[in-house]
Image (spheres, rainbow, N blue to C red):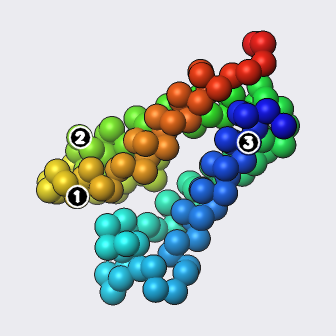
């Protein structure tokens, strides 16, 4: 199995883990926030499950499919995180439509959007630099 396929498989596991956070006892606080920071709702869960399916199918299919997944997933999640950092709401979970621009402390916006920024950036990086097969 190629490195890109392994990375896509790991993304599948991470995304399934993210989708399950609301359902693990003790992970959410009294306000329904995961780790006291993230307020995940059904849109977030569906987004993470759909992304996990995409990652898993890509990993099972081919290195090329995994490269495509990592590149486009990375772009989508990275830009969603940057938008969340700028205005407090992302677009992938329709937060920008539901809540609009949120005036939140910058430190909170960093913590809230870091998973999408870092995960998206690593996916893009992986799709370019861990490509071990000819295109």
In the displayed structure, 39 sits above or below 120; it is below
Disc ID at residue 6: 3
Cα distance between the residues tagged 3 and 1: 32 Å
Cα distance between the residues tagged 2 and 1: 12 Å
What residue sits 51% from the left and 67% below the top? 42
- Give x and y (percent) for residue 118: 43, 42
Helix, strand or loop at disc 3? Answer: helix
- Which one is closest to the eye, mark 2 or mark 3? 3
Q: Quadrant of the C terminus?
A: top right
Mark nearer the N terminus (2 vs 1): 2
Residue bearing the label numbered 1: 108
Mark nearer the N terminus (2 vs 3): 3
Camera sees residue 77: no
**Which residue, as the protein is rendered here, is positioned at the far top?**
134
Residue bearing the label numbered 2: 86
Helix, strand or loop at disc 1? Answer: helix
Where on the picture, by quarter, is residue 99?
A: bottom left
């Amino acid at each position: 199995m190629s490195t890109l396929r392994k990375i896509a498989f790991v993304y599948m596991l991470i995304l399934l883990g993210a989708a399950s956070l609301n359902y693990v006892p003790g992970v959410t606080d009294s306000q329904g926030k995961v780790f006291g920071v993230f307020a995940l709702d059904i849109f977030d869960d569906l987004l993470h499950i759909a992304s996990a399916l995409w990652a898993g199918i890509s990993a099972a299919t081919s290195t090329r499919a995994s490269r495509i997944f990592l590149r486009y997933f990375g772009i989508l999640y990275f830009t969603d995180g940057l938008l969340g950092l700028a205005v407090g709401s992302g677009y992938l979970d329709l937060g920008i439509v539901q809540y609009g621009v949120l005036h939140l402390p910058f430190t909170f916006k960093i913590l809230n959007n870091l998973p999408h920024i870092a995960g998206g950036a690593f996916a893009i990086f992986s799709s370019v630099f861990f490509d071990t097969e000819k295109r």
